[in-house]
Amino acid sequence: MTRRIAPVRLLNLLLLAGLLAWSIAVWPSLPARLPIHVDLDGTVDRWAERSIVAWFALPVLAAGVSLLLMGVRRLARRRPMIANLPDRDRLLRLPPAAQQAVLAEVGRLLDLVAVQTSLVFVLLQAGLHRVATAAGGPGWIVAALAVAVGGMPVLMIAGSLRLNRRLREESATAKG
């Protein structure tokens, strides 16, 4: 039996692979100094000497966050009692099949969070590259922050509403 990868997970893998491939491709053309921190008005306030650690920190962090979210998703499916949900007691009272249906929704939300987080890392790395090579200002960095600050609450609210609806549906079905 062939196992298919969910489209949202595939998108995340493509974002991570693209980030790593692009970071490797532009490595030879990077200047001697790299920006490593930008303040709120978009001004670079910390620089580092060009090094593998300075340049590849964001791609490694992006992959680490994705692996962490994937691990949390798998662990919650195997051990529903660790799921940190607003109505966990209701979840735990459901039959195992209904629990898994709710936890699948948690998994979808975590997959979307992984994609959104990877997108933020892609935008940050692109922005740091543009600043380092004097190809532009901090617009990409500001875009990354806008995606993070604006997108995450919307994603979490929409995901929580969908998750709560699924929990209510499964509870109603279990009651019968």
Image (cartoon, rainbow, N blue to C red):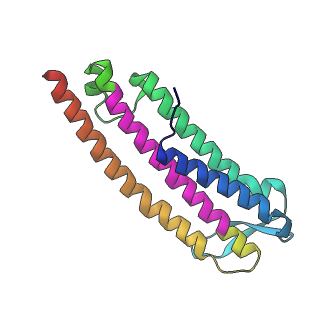
Q: Which quarter of the rendered picture does the C terminus lie within?
A: top left
Question: Is 113 inside the magenta-drawn segment?
Answer: yes
Left or right, 100 with reference to 79: left
Query: Could you say which is closer to the camera, residue 86 or residue 139?
Result: 139
In the rendered image, residue 42, in percent from the top left (x then y), is placed at 61, 75
Q: Residue at x 30, y 40 (%)?
A: 163
Query: Could you say which is closer to the camera, residue 135 or residue 1?
Result: 1
Query: Could you say which is closer to the camera, residue 40 or residue 163?
Result: 163
In the rendered image, residue 68, in percent from the top left (x then y), is placed at 57, 38
Position of residue 78 relative to residue 49, above or below, is above
Left or right, 150 with reference to 175: right
Numbered-mark total: 0
Q: Residue at x 66, y 67 (%)?
A: 126
Position of residue 90 relative to residue 19, above or below, is above
- Tell me where residue 41 sits by quadrant: bottom right
Question: Is residue 20 something one can see in this rendering?
Answer: yes
Question: Is residue 58 something one can see in this rendering?
Answer: no
- Tell me where residue 105 sits by quadrant: top left
- The boundaries of the magenta stretch are 100-126
Q: Main secondary structure of the magenta part?
A: helix
- Tell me where residue 141 sits by quadrant: bottom right
Position of residue 86 relative to residue 175, above or below, is below
Left or right, 48 with reference to 101: right
Q: Residue at x 71, y 80 (%)?
A: 135
In the rendered image, residue 62, in percent from the top left (x then y), is placed at 63, 50
Q: Residue at x 49, y 60 (%)?
A: 148
Position of residue 82 relative to residue 27, above or below, is above
Question: Is 30 inside the magenta-drawn segment?
Answer: no
